[in-house]
Amino acid sequence: MNQTTAPRRPAAAAPRRPAPPPRRPAPPPRPALRLGDSSRRTRAVLLAFLFLVSLVAGRLFEVQGVEGPAYAQDAFHDRLVKQPLPAVRGDITDRHGVALATNVLAYDVIADPTIVKDPARVGAALAPILHEPAADITGQITRVQQRNAGKPLKEQSRYAPLAQRQPPAVRAQIAALPAQDRSGVQLRTTSKRTYPSGSIGANVVGHVRTDGTAAAGLEYMLDGVLKGVDGTARYERAPQSTAVMPTGTETVKEPVDGAAVKLTLDRDIQWRAQEAIAAQVKASDADWGSVIALDVKTGQVYAMANSPTYDPNDYRHAASAAFTDQAVASSFEPGSTSKVMTVASALQEGVVTPSKVFTVPYTKKMSDKLFHDDEPHRVWHPTVTGILAKSSNVGTIQIANLMSPATLYSYLQKFGIGTKPQTGLQGEAAGILAKYTEWSGSQRYTVAFGQGLATSLLQVADVYQTLANGGVRIPPTVVQSVTKADGTPVPLAPRTPVRVVDPQVAKQMMSMMEAVTYEGGTGKYATIPGYRVAGKTGTAQVPGCGGYCQGKYQSSFVGVVPADNPRLVVAVTISVPKKGSHFGGTIAAPVFNQVASFALQTLDIPPSGTTSPKPDFGDVRG
C-alpha cells in the first residue's frame, strides 16, 4: 500500500547573531627609536643624579666646612660641665697650735634637673636622710625644671642645690638608695667648719654658717685670708648622664686654700677664764661679765672670756647677745680703775709724790656739784698712796685739780682712751673721751675718778699693761701670725710702742697699787699666796635713767702679778650684778684671783722672791 507522505513543515529559521562592533582603526605604527635617543636619556638621568649629589655635597660642605665649628661648639657646650672646686678654709689655732676652728670632710648634695625624671620620688627618698621636708626638696628641683622649659639644652640650668656640707654618713645613705630614687642626684666633695674646743674662745673666733659664709668674730673679720680662692673643673659628659666622658676635654684650675691663723690665746687659760667669769655672772645674776689676761711685755692676749657665750658648732640655738665680744665691744664708765691714770699723770707732772699728804673730807663741792666718797668717814689725812688704796673720789679730785684739764686729757689719750686698740676683733670700741674744751664744770672732776668717759675692758687692761711695763704701752694683740697654705707668712701691721710715763713713775705706781691689795686696801680678795699682787678696784654707777641708775653698778678689778717682776695683767668686769655685793673688790677681785693663779701655773711663772713692803696710807682711820 502506497503510503501518503505528509507534507514537511518549513524548518525554523536559526537566530541571527548581532553584528560585531566596528573595529577601531589600528594605531599608526610607532616610529622606531634611533640609537641616539638612548644616550640622551642616560645623560638626563646622569645630570639629575649629579644635581642631587651637588646639593648634598654643598650642604655637607656648608655643615662641615662653614657651620661645622658652630655645631661642634654647641654640642661641646651641651656636654661641658663647670664644677667649682672649693678652697679649704684655713685653720684658727691657739698659740700652741691647738685647733679652735678647723675643717672636716663633707658633701654638698645637688641635683641635675635635666636628668631627674620624677622629682617627687627623689624628694621623698632624700627627705629622711637630709632631714628636710620632701616638698622642699621636690620644689628645689621642679623650680629649676620650670625655668628650663622651652630653652635649648645648652641654656638649661643643671644645678639645683639640695643640702650643703653634709657628713660622710649622708653620702653613704644616698649611695645606698635605688637608682630611681637618686636619679640626677650628685654629691660634691667639700669641707665643713667645725670647732673642736666648743665654746672656748668662741667670742674671739666667731663662727661660719652652714652655707659657708662667715658670720662673727675673727672668722668674719679675717674672712678674706681664711677662705682662700675657689678653683674650677670643666669636663665633658654625655647628655642626660652624670658620667664623665673618659676621652672628653677636661681642664682644672686648682683652688688656693686659705691661710692659717695662729692666735695669742692659750686654750687652757681661756678655758679657766670662761669657767670663772661664767660662775660669777651666774652667782651674782649679772647682765654680763668679761675677763682678759694679757702679757705685760708683749701685749699678747692669753685669754678674752665673756659670759654669756655660745658654742659655734650650734650657733643657731644661741641668743643674739651671746655673739658679742663684750670685752672689746662694750664701753662702760670704768670708775675707780681709771684713777691710776690720774695719779700717774700727776706723778709724771711732778705735782705730787706717793707720800704727799692731802686733807680729804667725806664730801667736797667742786664747780656746781657736791662730790663724796663711797662710805662716810671723818676728815682723812691720807698720802697719795692712801688715796689710791682707799679709792677716795674726793682725794683723786684734789690730785687732778693740781693739773690743767688739757694736761689730764693729753695723758688719757696717751693711755689709749678714745682710740680703738686696733686688734682686728669684731665690734672693737674706741670708748668715749670728749675733748677737754667740751668738758662741763663738773666733768672736769668726774673724769679724774672714772665718770664722764667710757672705755672697753681691753682698754683698761692696756692702761695697766703700760704701768707694769715701765711706762711703755704696747698695743694689745690677739693674732700672733698668719701663714698662707704654701707656708708663706703674711705680714701683720706693726705694733708701735708708746712711752706714756717715765720708768720711775711706773715703778712708783706699781708700789702704790700693791697697797690696794694690802690689808686695809679695797682689793684684799685678789691676793695670791706666794705672789705679790698690784691692782685697783672699781665700782661705778651705770649711766642712764636720766642720769645714773639707782642700784645698777659696773664692778671691776684689774691686777698685775707678780708685782715685783710684772708678767701678767688680768682685768675683770661684771655688769649690773643683782645678787650679793656689787663692789669690785668683793665680786670681781675673786675672779682675778682664780684666773691669775691658774695662768701663773700654766705659764710656769715663779713666785715672788720678796714680800710686799708695808704701805704708807697716812691717816685714813674711820
Image: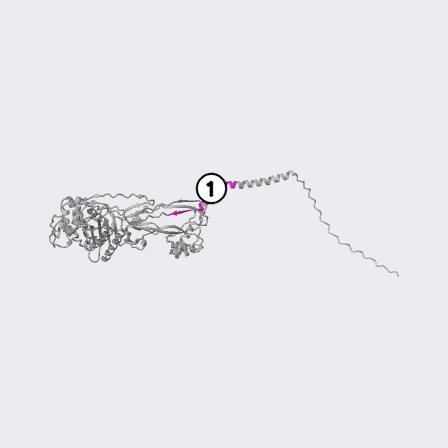
Q: Alpha-carbon neighbours of circle 1 within 10 Å: few (<14), some, or many (≥20)?
A: few
On the picture, is 426 further left or further right than 65? left
Chief SS of the magenta region: helix
Q: Nearer the viewer, residue 565 or 9?
A: 565
What residue is pinned by disc 1? 69
Instruction: List x then y, in percent, for residue 344.
Output: 17, 46
Instruction: List x then y, in percent, for residue 87.
Output: 36, 47
Please indicate, yes or no, whether residue 394 appears anywhere in the rendered image.
no
Q: Residue at x 59, y 40 (%)?
A: 46
Q: Amino acid at mark 1?
A: Pro
Number of numbered discs visible in the structure rendering: 1
Instruction: List x then y, in percent, for residue 262.
Output: 29, 48
Q: Residue at x 58, y 39 (%)?
A: 47
Q: Nearer the viewer, residue 217 or 491?
A: 491
Q: Which residue is situated farthest in the top direction here?
A: 36
Q: Secondary structure at mark 1?
A: helix
On the picture, is 131 further left or further right than 523? right
Q: Quadrant of the N terminus?
A: bottom right
First to last magenta residue range: 58-85
Q: Nearer the viewer, residue 434 or 559?
A: 559
On the picture, is 430 further left or further right than 45? left
Q: Which residue is situated farthest in the right direction here?
A: 1
Q: How is the image coloured?
A: one colour
Please indicate, yes or no, whether residue 231 appears anywhere in the rendered image.
yes
Instruction: List x then y, in percent, for residue 231.
Output: 38, 45
Does residue 485 belong to the magenta stretch? no
